[in-house]
Amino acid sequence: MGYKVAVVGATGNVGREMLNILAERDFPADEVVALASRRSQGTECSFGDKTLKVKALDHYDFSDVDICLMSAGGTVSKEWSPKIAAQGAVVIDNSSAWRMDPDVPLVVPEVNAGALDSFAKKNIIANPNCSTAQLVVALKPLHDKATIKRVVVATYQSVSGAGKDAMDELFSQTKAVFTIDEIENKKFTKRIAFNVIPHIDVFMDDGYTKEEWKMVVETKKILDPKIKLTATCVRVPVFVGHSEAVNIEFENPITADEAREILRSAPGCLVIDKRENGGYVTPYECVGEDATYISRIREDATIENGLQIWVVSDNLRKGAALNAVQIAESLIKRKLIAAKKKAA
């Protein structure tokens, strides 16, 4: 018997990608339901070779749903995830609402699938921040080999991480530059076209942004609380695909060649690292791909046991939708969930 899966926020960037990935990976679902707010009711969404009519979240009965993929923002998740979980569906939430709840596992399957064993406390599982997800996929195998002490990361994050309106703003501003029209800033604090903005999410009292804080606390929760991490998160004029320049300090020696071989055999990683023109991966090339790409692997001579790497991934996939579907697949593989018996 297959599973019944609900996708909440099905009309958004990530929700649509969740539907695409469920179809692509031939997820064992007998039924998939697309849900969104009442204003989106009746909208059509693609699911493989089928078209789904969006239903309203407000009045939906989740009693026969097995898995709910939630991508409707933190406010909606805070209200609805406990209600849906109480009806017996496992909620896999893409927002930041539950990530730091001690009773909710924060999971990247290649890194800490074992944390899923405790999901039943609230019947909710959290997806990490997009920039954290690709980072920990790359860090995990290196940490297992040489034990990471400290990470310094600068991100180059695409506008799709801020939603469809942000993508539209980059498009309209770019067009305005060439047609010499007025450039309007609505979604971002400053112009994004042909510019970079060192500011994602709100500022905190210590001068860091919340996006930077998320990377610190989520990496500790997923990978190891002993790891020290500092981040600078930057929005760049790229539609899809996050990039990260990552400096890593280890407790034990590790060479660039060793790191390259370790990462080549690590789950979810794909190494493209030729020391020649074009011998690396850019965000444009990772769009639509599942892997976390790692390039520019080299030793850092300024510290003992240091490496520098370049990490690129499709933020709508591994950073969000793909990771959520992989969590659902892990639940099934680990026999932590069974399909509800449907009425005859």
Image: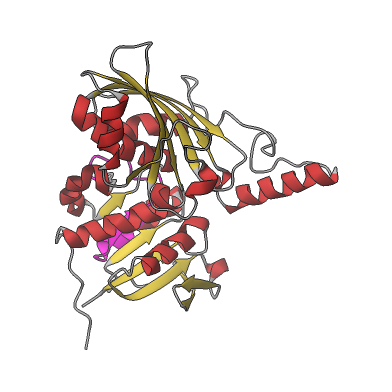
Determine whether 245 is above or below 341 in the image: above
Quadrant of the image occupied by residue 247:
top left
Q: Is residue 288 magenta?
A: no
> From the viewer's perspective, is 205 left or right of 303?
right
Name the side, left or right, on which 53 lies relative to 219: right
Where is residue 230, by image quadrant? top left
Identify the residue at the far front of this view. 276
The image quadrant that residue 34 belongs to is bottom left
| Towards the viewer: 181 or 135 | 135
Task: For residue 104, say whether it is visible.
Answer: no
Residue at horizontal 48%, vertical 21%? Answer: 205
Whole-percent x and y of residue 57?
44, 67
Q: Is 277 left or right of 335, judged from the image as shown? A: right
Q: Please give the range of residues in magenta.
A: 81-104
Give me the residue at 39% from left, 53% from top. 290
Farthest right residue?
180
Q: Is residue 149 above or below residue 275?
A: above
Tally of numbered discs: 0
The image's colour scheme reads secondary structure
Residue 299, how many percent across, how many down? Answer: 35, 20
**Residue 191 visible from this viewpoint:** yes
Q: Quadrant of the C terminus?
A: bottom left
Q: Give the camera-side residue of 160 and 309.
A: 309
Residue at 20 percent across and 78 percent down: it is 1
Tell me if residue 97 is in the magenta stretch. yes
Q: Position of residue 316 (x, y in %)?
A: 46, 51
| Residue projecting furthest to the bottom | 344
Residue 80 drawn above or below residue 136? below
Residue at x-position 45% and y-position 40%: 312
